Image (spheres, grey):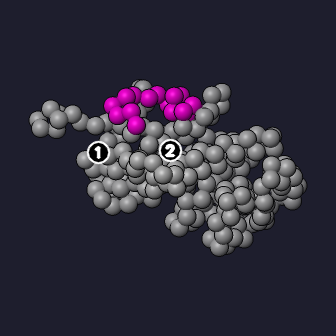
Amino acid sequence: MPNQILVVDDEDRIRRLLKLYLERESFEIDEARDGKEAYDKAMNHDYACILLDLMLPEMDGITVASRLREHKETPIIMLTAKGEETNRVEGFETGADDYIVKPFSPREVVLRLKALLRRTQVATSEQSEPHAKDLIEFDHLIIDNDAHRVLADEKQVNLTPKEYELLIFLAKTPNKVFDREQLLKEVWHYEFYGDLRTVDTHVKRLREKLNRVSGDAAQMIQTVWGVGYKFEVKTNDESTE
């Protein structure tokens, strides 16, 4: 269902408002009023994206996102009335790709949703285009951008769209240090808003997933204390020392 969005919120008013604005942009809208209904629908359908409220009856949004991530990589935008940093970080740690704090502008939701889908679709559509195979290869890590696949020591690593985008951005410029503000701008496309902890949380999750199959691949993502992060590739001289 390439154009269908699942809107999850226990408030009828918010669901109606989001449905109104999204249908104007030619999206098809499915709705869920609680976490259990949202989880069941998301497991049985392939949505383009899920707009997921944090505070829900039956099953909260954090639990829904966490359980979904065990099976699917569907893009998730978390909607939350809790603006505290810990709640936002918790949302990202469960696999959310973006967050929007209530009260929000419906137009902002539409723009953020379309931006996320555009980046995801551009990355995945390349595999159907006839051109030379797009590979980024290192000793312990291969990124197959045509197939949207990551292999660490020949084992596949399942990443969310945002984790994949972060990895490929760093890997395309080995050994260059990026500060958090740069990464927010280039990967999240946030220029005037955005939580720097967003970057830290995604880097942490990315390392953990790589480390499950290859410690060497995980170590390629290095923290440069007081600055930011880099994708470290040792030169031949360094690797023989």
Question: Looking at the figure, which quarter contains the C terminus?
Answer: top left
Image label count: 2
| Residue at 70% from the left image edge and 45% from the top image edge | 114
Identified by mark 1, the residue type is: Phe
- Rounded to the nearest angstrom, the CA distance separating label 2 from label 1 is 17 Å
Q: Is residue 86 left or right of residue 24?
A: left
- Which residue is denoted by mark 2 in the rendering? 165
Q: Is residue 89 visible?
A: yes
In the image, residue 61 lies at what x, y percent? 66, 59
Towards the viewer: 169 or 124? 124
| Residue at 45% from the left image edge and 48% from the top image edge | 131
In the image, residue 173 lies at what x, y percent? 39, 33
Towards the viewer: 127 or 43? 127
Q: Residues within 10 Å of mark 1 (few under 14, many from 20)?
A: some
Identified by mark 2, the residue type is: Glu
Which residues lie in the magenta part?
172-186
Q: Secondary structure at mark 2?
A: helix
In the image, residue 211 lies at what x, y percent? 34, 53
- Which residue is denoted by mark 1 in the rendering? 138
Towards the viewer: 207 or 28? 28
Q: Residues within 10 Å of mark 2 (few under 14, many from 20)?
A: some
